[in-house]
């Protein structure tokens, strides 16, 4: 296998993404977790760029690293998590079960990757640059996937109406 710059960059970004994801869940400070989550979002955007999905990379930066992270930071600041003793958790049977299940899932994934023996699909590799563009995604979204797109919009509308109704009940 020839190691090109793109391949090395892909593996570097993948390792950075995994490392930052682990740091998100192991940090005690919520602010540090949010900062590592931002690193994770940027490394995922870089992974999308190496896969020639430019539109998804830009959306990853704008939506997740921009809007959602600002929301997380505001929530953390509003909660004012000053007393860390209250937040300290003890090792319980639930954590032990979670660690065991996580290890089992990791072993399953490693087994599938190691013994799958399947080839990656090469059907669309020649068109990879075209598939990642805004025009292609828009054309597919509004032709091939129009029905799921409309169903998603109806579900989001129902969720917004439900949130307004629940908030109105709390105010009254």
Image (cartoon, helix red, strand yellow):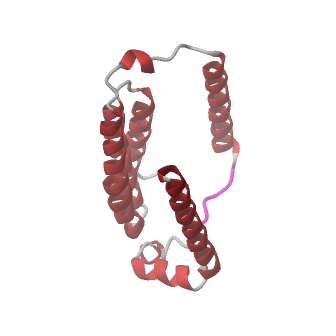
- Name the residue rendered at 60%, 67% in the picture: 155
Q: Is residue 77 visible?
A: yes
**Is residue 52 shown above or below 72?**
below
Would you say 53 lies left or right of 97 here? left
Image spot of residue 170 (x, y percent): 51, 50
Image spot of residue 162 (x, y percent): 57, 61
Depth check: 120 or 2 in front? 120
**Is residue 77 shown above or below 123?**
above
Would you say 145 lies left or right of 18 here? right
Image spot of residue 149 (x, y percent): 58, 75
Depth check: 120 or 3 in front? 120
Q: Quadrant of residue 22?
A: top left
Q: For the image shown, how many numbered marks are present on the structure?
A: 0
Magenta run includes residue 19? no
Extent of the magenta region: 117-121
- Name the residue rendered at 38%, 55% in the picture: 64
**Is residue 12 shown above or below 58?**
above
Depth check: 59 or 152 in front? 152
- Name the residue rendered at 54%, 81% in the picture: 140
Image spot of residue 90 (x, y percent): 53, 13
**Is residue 166 shown above or below 25?**
below
Q: Is residue 4 visible?
A: no
Would you say 55 lies left or right of 171 here? left
Q: Quadrant of residue 20?
A: top left
- Classified by dominant secondary structure, the portion drawn in magenta counts as loop
């Amino acid at each position: 296998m020839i190691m090109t710059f793109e391949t090395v960059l892909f593996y570097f970004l993948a390792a950075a993404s995994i490392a930052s994801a682990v740091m998100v869940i192991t940090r005690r400070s919520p602010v540090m977790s949010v900062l590592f989550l931002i690193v994770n979002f940027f490394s995922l955007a870089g992974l999308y760029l190496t896969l020639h999905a430019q539109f998804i990379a830009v959306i990853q930066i704008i939506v997740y690293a921009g809007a959602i992270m600002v929301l997380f930071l505001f929530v953390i600041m509003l909660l004012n998590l000053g007393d860390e003793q209250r937040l300290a958790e003890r090792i319980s049977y639930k954590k032990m079960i979670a660690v065991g299940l996580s290890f089992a899932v990791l072993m399953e994934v490693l087994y599938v990757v190691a013994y799958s023996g399947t080839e990656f699909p090469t059907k669309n590799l020649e068109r990879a640059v075209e598939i990642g563009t805004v025009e292609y995604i828009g054309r597919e979204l509004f032709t091939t996937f129009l029905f799921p797109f409309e169903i998603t919009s109806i579900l989001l509308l129902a969720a917004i109406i439900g949130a307004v109704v629940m908030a109105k009940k709390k105010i009254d």
